[in-house]
Amino acid sequence: MSKTESRRPVVVVDNVKVTFRLFASGKRISPSTARVKHKGRLREVEALKGISLVAYEGETIGVIGTNGSGKSTLMNAIAGLIAIDSGAVYASSRPSFLGVGAAMIRELTGEKNVILGGLALGMSRTEIREKYDAIVDFAGLRDFIDLPMKTYSSGMVERLKFAIAAAREHDILIIDEALAVGDQDFRRRSEARMRELARNAGSVFLVSHSMKSIMDTCDRAIWLDAGLMKMDGKAVDVCRAYSEYVGAPLDD
């Protein structure tokens, strides 16, 4: 029995297809616009063309591919944030999504956002109080935590999002480019925390354009290309093949 076969599957993606229907202008059709008559043609874009994979307990999986390859669409499908046209996604628990779209209230202080973010993740107020100092120090925002979030740089906001999400254990955690922010020390601490989360019976997906982050953090990687699974294997092998394909250095 192989190593993966002896572990519990936590996410199963079975032949998932997602098609976006767009107006000629590129705007997606929504319930509010579907009833409006528009001049011009409608386009259909196949974002995912039958993706299948199994993520096992304790795995950290890198997700790579060029812009428009379907990375974010796949992660949104796994998290249940978008509807799929066919196929199925099975998860042992509800995935937690940490990405650029994670909501923070700009008018509130960093302190208030830590509290609200912790509550949104299911933590009790007592648990938030116990972990508050660790969250603030992990993000490196001790001198700014009492200021409104609208005064933060985008990097500071993303560091705080990661620190809040990483403060609790997750069965399934999806991180979209979170390690692209912060200095080398923050990236090192983030990568170490991701490995710890994966070891504690969780599964982590990391979407990144940085091959170095993928190789340093993940033991497995999947490569998407135009909505198709181009490669699935050891992170170093997939990153090397992708790097050769796009003509970019591995340490980029």
Image: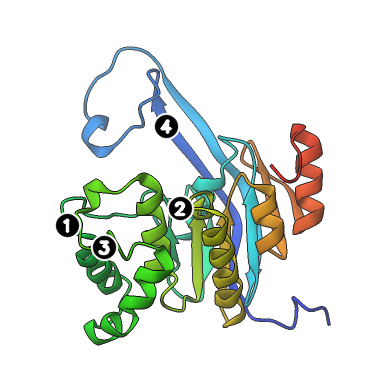
Q: Quadrant of the C terminus?
A: top right
Q: Which residue is mark 3?
A: 145
Q: Is 208 situated left or right of 93 in this image?
A: right
* Coloration mode: rainbow
Disc 1 secondary structure class: loop
Disc 4 secondary structure class: strand
Q: Nearer the viewer, mark 2 or mark 4?
A: 2
Labels 1 and 2 touching (C-beta < 8 A) = no
The disc at residue 33 is none
Residue 233 in view (yes/no) = no
Labels 3 and 4 touching (C-beta < 8 A) = no
Q: Nearer the viewer, mark 1 or mark 3?
A: 3
Q: Is 238 situated left or right of 199 in this image?
A: right
Mark 3 is surrounded, within 10 Å at the Cα level, by few (under 14), some (14 to 19) or many (20 or more) other residues, namely many
User: Which mark is first along the chain, 2 or 1?
Assistant: 2
User: Which mark is first along the chain, 4 or 2?
Assistant: 4
Residue type at mark 1 is Leu
Alpha carbons under labels 1 and 2: distance apart: 27 Å
Q: Is 235 situated left or right of 112 in this image?
A: right
User: Which mark is first along the chain, 4 or 1?
Assistant: 4
Corner quadrant of residue 216: bottom right
Q: Which residue is mark 1?
A: 108
Mark 4 is surrounded, within 10 Å at the Cα level, by few (under 14), some (14 to 19) or many (20 or more) other residues, namely some
